[in-house]
Image (spheres, grey):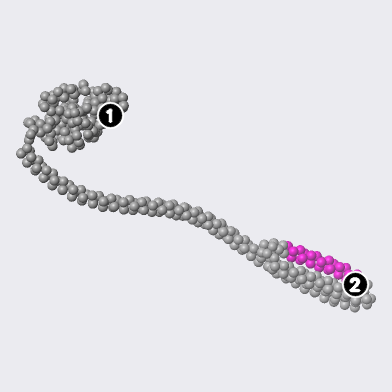
Amino acid sequence: MNLQPHTNTEHRCLLHRANSASSNCCFTVRRMETGLYVNVPADERRNRKEKRGSTVYRWVGVSFGLLCIVQCALNVSYRLHAAGCDSVTTHNFTLKLADDIRVLILERDQLVHERDQLVQERDRLVQEKDRLVQEKDRLVQERDRLVQEKHQLVQERDQLVQEMDQLVQERDQLVQERDQLVRVRDQLEKEKRELRANTRRLNDDMKTLEEKVIKLERKLVIAQQNGPRCPSGWDTHMSSCYQLSSSMNTWDCAESDCARKDSNLVILNDEAEEEAVRRFTGPVKIWMGVSGTYGYASSWTWTLVDGSSLSYANWNDHNQDFLSCSHSCAYVDQSWHWKTWFVGACQDQHYWMCEKKLLK
């Protein structure tokens, strides 16, 4: 009879040690989880926080299940011992059982308190997670906005770089054009200075020539008054007299008319004489005292009416049309300003001009 209470006491002590060990094990595991929680990355800590709430619920459920099993075992044990023990033993066992129940209730209250703390911690962590999720979403939006602004700024930068390159090219082109214009300006300034110098020199020469012309005209007037004169109806140039026909005829008829007037068909010996004849005749075609043949040596043989040789010529390039003619006659086309000598058929009809020396 005395061994049974001792056995029950040892049973309660073992049960209390088991519960204490279980509680210490739980705290040890919790401290280990807390240490691991600090050392893991943020994403893994969030995952463990989410799993932690479910682990707490499992531990609480297991604890209540153990309490229920212990309670049932104690009830059965008490009833069995109550039937075979005396009242003193039953009283002592009841007191110890009440102490065990109080210990279990305290442990239960402690577990409930820990559960409430864990629930609060879980709720706080859930709120922190929601806040971090919102902060993450806000940062993601801010990142996307910054990325778009970055792309836009890059495009604007590229466009500005292209515009800058184009402006640099235009600037270089303008610099080249400016340098070229400066060179042209300098060249024109140089030419202008040279032209001014030439103009001054020509003006001086012209004044000198005008003075000489005036003197020569005076001498000519004096010479004409004192010297020989051309017959009436004849024009004077230097020491020769010239007369233009009033009609057109062939070269032979023109030569015969001049021979009757003791003169010859005009022979132009220089540019001055040709210019004088142009003033006398105007823009007409007149026979000259020159005729010729085109020989086998591919050259012209010219004959002058006064028997002299040809010392001056002003042939036109269109004379190739008469290379096949056996005999041709020369005439002057005063409507041309240069290259006025032509070759034509002697049977053509043109005006003519007679020339003779001044009378002594």
Q: Which residues are magenta?
A: 54-82
Left or right position of 113 against 348:
right
Quarter holding residue 307: top left
Q: Between tags 2 and 1, which lies in front? A: 1
Q: Residue reaching furthest left? A: 226
Residue type pointed to by label 1 = His
Tell me which numbered mark, 2 or 1, is placed earlier along the sequence.
2
Residue 40, can we see it?
yes
Image: 200 above or below 237: below
Left or right position of 146 against 109:
left
Residue that carries the numbered disc 2 in the rendered image: 82
Quarter holding residue 231: top left
Most common secondary structure along the magenta stretch: helix
Q: CA distance from mark 2 to mark 1?
A: 165 Å
- Check if residue 78 falls in the magenta segment: yes
Residue 37 x/y as whole percent: 70, 67
Residue type pointed to by label 2 = Ala
Task: Quadrant for the N terminus, please.
Answer: bottom right
Residue that carries the numbered disc 1 in the rendered image: 318
Residue 112, can we see it?
no
